[in-house]
Amino acid sequence: MANLVEVSEVVKQFRAVRALDGCSFTIAAPGLIGLVGKNGAGKTTLLSALAGSLRPSSGRVAVLGLAPGDPDLLGSVGVLTQDASFRRGVPAREQLLHLARLSGVAPAAARTQIHELLAELGNDDFADQPPERLSYGQRKRLGIVQALLGNPKLVLLDEPTAGLDPLAAKAVRELIRRRGADTAFILSSHNLYEIQDVCSRVLVIDRGKLVGDADVAHLAANSDTLMITLDREPGAELTEALLRVPEVTDVARRRDGRPGLTIRFAATGIDALQLRIQTALVELGYSVVALTREKALADDVLDLVGSE
């Protein structure tokens, strides 16, 4: 059976600029894969090559064993571009139905899918209005829905939560997680904490080269950070108590909005350290909802791509 995705020594040259420079990787099975890198690193160019909207200068790209854009891939690849737009003056639902038909989805099935996907992202109350009357977040949700219509085997999402409020972004992440068992997602984002939270694998691109391809769980196994979720927001007294633990070097609020802390440490006896931290939490009346050991993905990415 062919891999879902095969990228082999792909180069894309735009006059004097080499946007992709020998990228190679494979995706063998469904799952959630993050694509990260600085602005101009080549992320959007790579997604465009996979989508079939851009032809590489050299190298090979295959999706389900076929060249991107092959008619036999109709409905198998869903795409959300960062600048996705809809036609003015035409109700959004009508446009989604048209796009579904172009992907080979029957009208009745398309109506059901559109309703269910929009409901998972909040509601579909706005879908009968034209796009120019909708908020940015509503239009972004429409773009995500059109990428998922027909249950494609590969979905390419370029900054799917950029500009969304926290609740809307959370709904998008949960939708992606639910479908990751049956669909391969490649998710490009500048939000490295989101990538670490959602994805099981991360591809790092820099100056057109693939400089990293790692399993997120493997990164966590060699960590120097504890991520703790608590039953309520932590107070200053907890931070002060944890900073008195000799091995703890820094304590900060979680960046994902959950009540809890990110604790950095310098220690080899992690089990004893976790016991001391949990003791401090209990003494101050906090309950631990979840505790994981991991390394912030941001640190690894910065190590790979260097400074500007």
Image: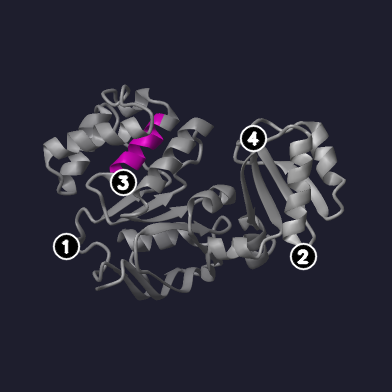
Q: Which residues are magenta?
A: 138-147
Q: Amino acid at mark 2?
A: Thr
**Sequence-first tag of 3 and 2:** 3
Name the element at disc 4.
Answer: loop
The residue tagged 4 is 259
92 vs 157, left or right, is: left
**Sequence-first tag of 2 and 4:** 4
Quarter the C terminus occupies: bottom right
246 vs 259, left or right, is: right
Could you tell me if the residues under marks 3 and 4 are in contact, i.e. CB atoms within 8 Å? no
* Residue 144 lies in the magenta stretch: yes
**Sequence-first tag of 2 and 1:** 1
User: Picture coordinates of residue 233 (x, y %)?
Assistant: 68, 31
Query: Which residue is at a point 68% across and 51% down the rendered structure image?
Result: 226
User: Picture coordinates of residue 222 (x, y %)?
Assistant: 65, 65
**Residue 297 location, quadrant:** bottom right
Q: Amino acid at mark 1?
A: Asp
Q: Amino acid at mark 3?
A: Ala
In the rendered view, would you say 31 is above or below 124? below
Estimate the spatial distance between the alpha carbons at disc 3 and disc 2, rounded to whole Å. 45 Å
Name the element at disc 3.
Answer: helix
The residue tagged 1 is 72
> Badge 4 local density, few (<14 within 10 Å), some, or many (20+)?
some
User: Picture coordinates of residue 154 (x, y %)?
Assistant: 31, 57
Q: Nearer the viewer, residue 31 or 57?
A: 31
